[in-house]
Amino acid sequence: MHEISLIRTVFNTLEAEFSPEELSRLQAVDLKVGLLSNVEPILLQNAFAAVTQSEGKYETTTLNIETVPIEVYCPVCDKNSPVKDYKFACSCGRPSSDVVSGTELLIHRIHFAEPASVRSA
Amino acid sequence: MQKIQRSSKAARGTVTCDNTTMHLLKANDFVADSIRKQMAAQNILLLNITSSAGSGKTTLLQETIKRLGGQINIKILVGDLETERDADRLRAVGGDALQIVTGGICHLEAQMVWQAMESLNLDGVDLLIIENVGNLVCPASFDLGEDYRVTLIATTEGDDKPKKYPRMFLTSELMLVSKVDLLEYLPFSVDNVVADARDINPDIDVMELSTINGTGVDAWCNWLLNKVAEKKEAASLAAS
Ligand SMILES: Nc1nc2c(ncn2[C@@H]2O[C@H](COP(=O)(O)OP(=O)(O)OP(=O)(O)O)[C@@H](O)[C@H]2O)c(=O)[nH]1
Ligand SMILES: [Mg+2]
Ligand SMILES: [Zn+2]
């Protein structure tokens, strides 16, 4: 898979959004990874370690990965049901491929430390 | 549009992100939308053909060119890790094919297709077919702006593929069960594979195919001609 390039995308996305000063205080990044995203959390952690070490950046940052189960929406019952054994169906039995969660591959939360000199408000 | 919930002060503490702006494939999806718009403007049907390595994609495209090359204007983009071999095979039967060598990347991304499209003359083209890299995992996640995703599963691969690679079958409109000429020698059940694929995607269409004995090739060609015609009808409706 393409875990290394995903990790680089994480850093590029953060660098486009936050200043170097802010990123120097980056403590943790929380990713949401759906079970359908074809991304293995372990491989992503390994890629994260490889990229941070080889580039000497973000070495004190932690990567947290939350896996998201697959759910489909049923318009008849107007509710979501978990997908079990890759049977894409509502708990009422009607098949549905309206996947409402499980394909996620995104940065969900970012944690920063306090700036070194915080002036009182 | 609020991108990230943050104040104008330097970020501190926990910042919660908007799901769309921090999507890791958003660059790909953005380019895929550009491709879709350009294909709509030129009334070109775009297909993304995927499968495991060696399921018969190039052979099917060779056959398609032989049958339909005189009726509609077809161009092909072929993704491959290292070689030009598939494009050469398609040119050998008169196809107009361009190879995208991914240099070891295990899937095509929209950006690669967009760049390749710059060196294609698309005037008067009816159908642009992309043969993706042979792999059921990674190509599943990358939208290339296609109208239809067509996935081949060969009888030689075993009939457990849909549940092993659900994302691909979830995102495909058509599953082609290929190499059915070998069915009598193999422990492969077409019924099982169709049932498993429809557990994942109840709407998926299925055709059985063999380029050796010709099973399903007419049906495939008719499917293509219908979809090309539908795309043109949709365009002329939008224009009128
Ligand atoms: N028996 C049988 N063999 C087939 C059929 N179609 C293709 N083959 C053989 O399967 C092998 C692979 O076919 P290709 O068309 O190169 O497969 P591909 O999916 O393009 O392969 P990659 O691009 O490498 O992923 C070749 O040896 C073909 O001759 C078929 O309908 N029946
Ligand atoms: Mg091929
Ligand atoms: Zn229901």
Image: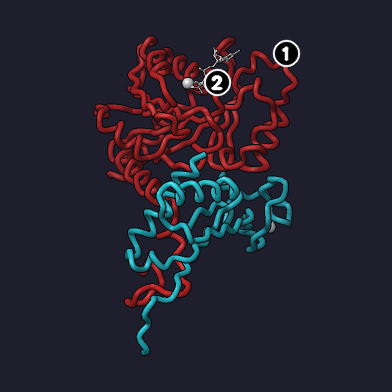
Residue B225 showing in the rendered view: no
Residue B18 showing in the rendered view: yes
The residue lying toward the viewer, choosing from A54 and B185, is: A54
Instruction: Give the image's coloring scheme.
Output: by chain
Q: Which residue is mark 1?
A: B185
Q: Which residue is mark 2?
A: B54
Residue shown at 69%/37% (left/top)? Answer: B196
The numbered dot on residue B204 is none
Estimate the x, y position of residue A44 in percent, counting from the top left. Answer: 54, 48
The residue lying toward the viewer, choosing from B165 and A73, is: B165
Q: Chain of mark 1?
A: B
Tag 1's secondary structure? helix
> How many marks can you see?
2
Estimate the x, y position of residue B188 in percent, counting from the top left. Answer: 72, 23
Estimate the x, y position of residue B233 in percent, counting from the top left. Answer: 36, 37
Q: Is residue A26 above or below residue A6?
A: below
